[in-house]
Amino acid sequence: MKNKSNLCLLAAGILLAGVATGKSGIVLDPVGPAPLSAAINSNTGALNVYSAFEVTADFNSRDPYRQEYSNYRIYSDDGKLLQFVQNDTGNVFGSPAKVSLAPGEYRIMAHANGYGTVTVPVVVTANRVTTVHLEGGYAWPNEPAFNRHNAVRLPDGNIVGWRTAQ
C-alpha cells in the first residue's frame, strides 16, 4: 500500500512539474512572408518575431515599465541551434529585433502569450520580411485578406502570420 501511495505522489509531482514549466508543446504550421511584403533590397531575408512580452520589468533599462518582447531561439530545419535572439532593441518604440537570415527554412522556439513556448517553422525568402506575431491580440492592418487557408493561427484564433505556399 505504501508503494502505491508513493507512486501516486510521484505521478502527481511529475504532472504538476509539467504544468509549472509552461511548455505547451504546440507546433504551428509554417509561416512565411506576406504575399506583398516590403522589399529589403538584399540577398538575405529578414525575420521579425513579436514574441510574448516579458512578465517582469527590466529595472536596468531606461524605462523599466516599457514592455519588452521575450527572447527566442532560431534552429535550422534539422534542429541545430543557430542563434539566440535578444528580442528587445531598446528603442522607445518597443519593436522586436529584426534578424537577417539566409533564405531557407528555420524553426523558432518562442513564448506565445497564453501558450508558453511554441515552435513555429518559418520560411525566409530573399529580399522579404517574414513576420510572426505571438504577443496576442495584434490588429493586422489587412486582416480581411486572411482566411482559413492562408493564415497560421494559435488555438484561440489569433493570427500568427501568413501560411507558406506548400
Image: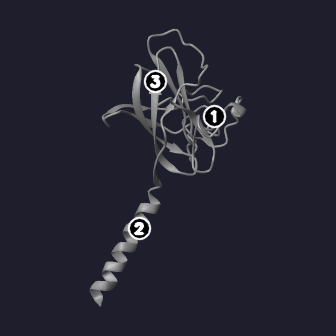
Disc 1 residue type (three-letter) = Asp
Mark 3 or 1, closer to the camera: 3
Of callouts 3 and 1, which one flags the residue occurring earlier in the amino acid sequence?
1
Snapshot quadrant of residue 36: top right
Which residue in the structure is indicated by mark 1? Answer: 63
**Residue 55 place in picture, x, y as percent:** 57, 47
Task: Kindly state the secondary structure of the residue where label 1 is placed.
Answer: loop
Which of the numbered marks, if any, corresponds to residue 124? 3
Which of the numbered marks, if any, corresponds to residue 15? 2
Spatial CA distance of label 3 from label 1 is 33 Å
Q: Is residue 136 in view? A: yes
Task: Kindly state the secondary structure of the residue where label 2 is placed.
Answer: helix
**Relative to the observer, which residue lies in front, 126 or 67?**
126
Position of 73 relative to 111 (above/below): above
**Residue 165 place in picture, x, y as percent:** 50, 29
Mark 1 or 2, closer to the camera: 2
For the residues labelled 2 and 3, say whether their Cβ atoms are less than 8 Å apart.
no
Disc 3 residue type (three-letter) = Val
**Residue 81 place in picture, x, y as percent:** 33, 34
Spatial CA distance of label 2 from label 3 is 37 Å
Task: Kindly state the secondary structure of the residue where label 3 is placed.
Answer: strand
